[in-house]
């Protein structure tokens, strides 16, 4: 599509009627002054108030803005220890003892936007542009399958050549691929495709839903209006603050009931961004009765041709990063929390123990980088820099040493445990029971199909511990039919069956 065609395409993207319907008295849910006022009011929170907040989090209730602000303003190291311990306890209650793994697959890096922090931006002449063909998407999928992944998130720039029809073709291409597991010879495939893409109108979102996506992920990047305007030029699609702010409202109304929010930490003050994420979750709950399926909190890392990505005054320290993770875990207790391979292995290991539920591994961010391992994609095509390039087996082995079971579960999507259903189960700490069962089943698959000897040794000991917990659980003893089904499925996986779930 030429320059003229791209300009015409851009004119038809934003529909104000699909924004205005969600406003309250003409205003959106982010109020800079209100956020700053809450942080000021709670500048020296009483320890008794903090402990009351921790008890509320343990009851799996979303926190109010002043409660989250109070947590963010804690200075006492001993109180922070209590906050961290409570974050771990909340994660255990809601999601049990597992970490879910996925891989990102970058399908294209053409983009009409000019975000100051991103290597994909249109004006970056250093970026080598590429759009994967469907055969290339299939090759990338095969390469990811050889690592052992079962979940993919497809990533796209915003461009007419990669609009919704291209995305749907990519989804279909991924689902069409079958591979053979190297250790067992069993057939394997990607079981769930999520999407990280630009905001869309509801008609396009309905098409994505019909194509079989799992979660739709759109990051606001920064909730601070002035910063948003500074890093997203006003003449670009991404420069429209409210079109992005209500992207996930539209998705839920269009039937995509699992949505994912996030902010790019390092663009503005980290405490403000945590408050913005909370207000986003609260408004989704207010308007639809469900919060975000996941929250992501990537830190800005160097990007090819981006001065800001190396020089922002708001870069987040490791200490503050750990604090924001713990506070988010407590503030939106039902949300899954994703720490990505942007982080170096050491810090990733620490925050996994502060309430995170998902992470990526064997991550390649270049276009075509999984199937062509010889190219240095970090130099040729760098939207940002990753800190943890380790393969999946290495990360699973480390997670096992920490005492966590690795999960590739996609059962919720296929059993109807999405949207309001899963949010209700999460808030009552019932979904964690199914998380545990399905984590064990998919971990058994991985150990048989892909694990290195060292990883399998750690995994066998860990999985036995999980099996004993299941057998001794009062919850499962009261549900003998569920327990019997799990026992049968576990035996069937050992015997060679795959993709069994409850």
Image (cartoon, grey):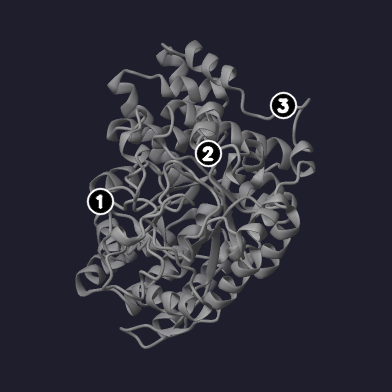
Residue 464 lies, with reference to residue 96, above or below; the image says below
Residue 230, horizontal then vertical, whole percent: 50, 32
Q: Nearer the viewer, mark 1 or mark 2?
A: 2
Residue found 59% across the figure and 37% down from its top: 234
Q: In the drawing, does residue 23 fall left or right of residue 429?
A: right
Between 249 and 233, the residue placed more toward the observer is: 233
Q: Nearer the viewer, residue 88 or 32?
A: 32
In the rendering, at what x and y percent does residue 256 appear? 67, 56
What residue sits 50% from the left and 40% below the top?
Answer: 221
Query: How far is disc 2 from disc 3 in space, using C-alphas?
Result: 21 Å
Q: Is residue 388 left or right of residue 120?
A: left
Residue position for label 3: 27
Q: Secondary structure at mark 3?
A: loop
Query: Residue drawn 55% across and 21% down?
Result: 35
Q: Which residue is under mark 2?
A: 232
Q: Nearer the viewer, residue 119 or 297?
A: 119
Residue position for label 1: 345
The quadrant in which the C terminus is found is: bottom right
Q: Real-space Cα distance between discs 1 and 2?
A: 31 Å
């Amino acid at each position: 599509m030429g320059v003229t065609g791209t300009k015409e395409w851009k004119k038809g993207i934003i529909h104000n009627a699909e924004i205005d319907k969600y406003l309250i008295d003409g205003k959106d849910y982010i109020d800079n002054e209100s956020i700053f006022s809450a942080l000021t009011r709670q500048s020296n929170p009483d320890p008794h108030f903090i402990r009351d907040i921790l008890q509320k989090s343990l009851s799996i209730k979303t926190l109010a803005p002043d409660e989250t602000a109070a947590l963010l303003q804690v200075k006492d190291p001993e109180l922070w220890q209590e906050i961290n311990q409570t974050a771990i306890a909340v994660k255990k209650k809601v999601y049990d003892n597992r970490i879910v793994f996925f891989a990102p697959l970058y399908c294209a890096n053409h983009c009409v936007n000019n975000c100051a922090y991103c290597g994909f931006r249109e004006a970056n002449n250093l970026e080598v542009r590429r759009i994967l063909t469907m055969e290339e998407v299939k090759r990338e999928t095969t390469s990811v399958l050889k690592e052992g992944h079962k979940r993919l998130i497809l990533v796209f720039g915003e461009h007419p050549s990669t609009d919704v029809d291209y995305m749907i073709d990519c989804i279909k291409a991924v689902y069409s691929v079958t591979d053979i597991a190297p250790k067992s010879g069993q057939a394997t495939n990607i079981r769930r495709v999520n999407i990280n893409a630009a905001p869309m109108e509801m008609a396009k979102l309905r098409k994505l839903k019909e194509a079989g996506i799992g979660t739709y992920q759109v990051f606001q990047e920064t909730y601070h209006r002035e910063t948003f305007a500074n890093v997203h030029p006003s003449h670009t699609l991404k420069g429209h603050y409210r079109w992005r702010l209500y992207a996930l409202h539209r998705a839920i109304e269009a039937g995509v009931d699992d949505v994912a929010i996030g902010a790019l930490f390092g663009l503005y003050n980290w405490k403000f961004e945590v408050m913005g994420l909370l207000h986003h979750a609260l408004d989704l709950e207010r308007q639809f009765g469900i919060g975000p399926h996941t929250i992501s909190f990537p830190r800005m890392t160097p990007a090819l041709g981006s001065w800001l990505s190396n020089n922002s005054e708001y870069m987040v320290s490791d200490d503050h990063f750990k604090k924001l993770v713990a506070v988010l875990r407590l503030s939106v207790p039902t949300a899954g929390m994703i720490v990505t391979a942007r982080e170096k292995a050491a810090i990733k290991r620490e925050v996994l123990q502060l309430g995170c539920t998902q992470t990526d591994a064997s991550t390649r961010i270049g276009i075509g980088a999984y199937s062509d391992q010889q190219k240095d994609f970090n130099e040729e095509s760098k939207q940002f820099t990753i800190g943890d390039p380790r393969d999946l087996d290495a990360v699973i082995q480390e997670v096992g040493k920490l005492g966590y079971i690795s999960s590739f579960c996609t059962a919720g999507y296929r059993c109807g445990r999405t949207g309001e259903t899963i949010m209700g189960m999460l808030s009552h700490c019932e979904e964690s029971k199914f998380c545990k069962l399905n984590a064990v089943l998919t971990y058994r698959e991985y150990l048989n199909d892909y694990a290195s000897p060292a990883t399998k040794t750690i995994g066998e000991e860990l999985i036995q511990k999980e099996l004993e917990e299941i057998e001794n659980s009062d919850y499962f003893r009261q549900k003998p039919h569920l327990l019997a089904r799990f026992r049968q499925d576990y035996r069937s996986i050992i015997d060679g069956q795959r993709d069994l779930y409850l």
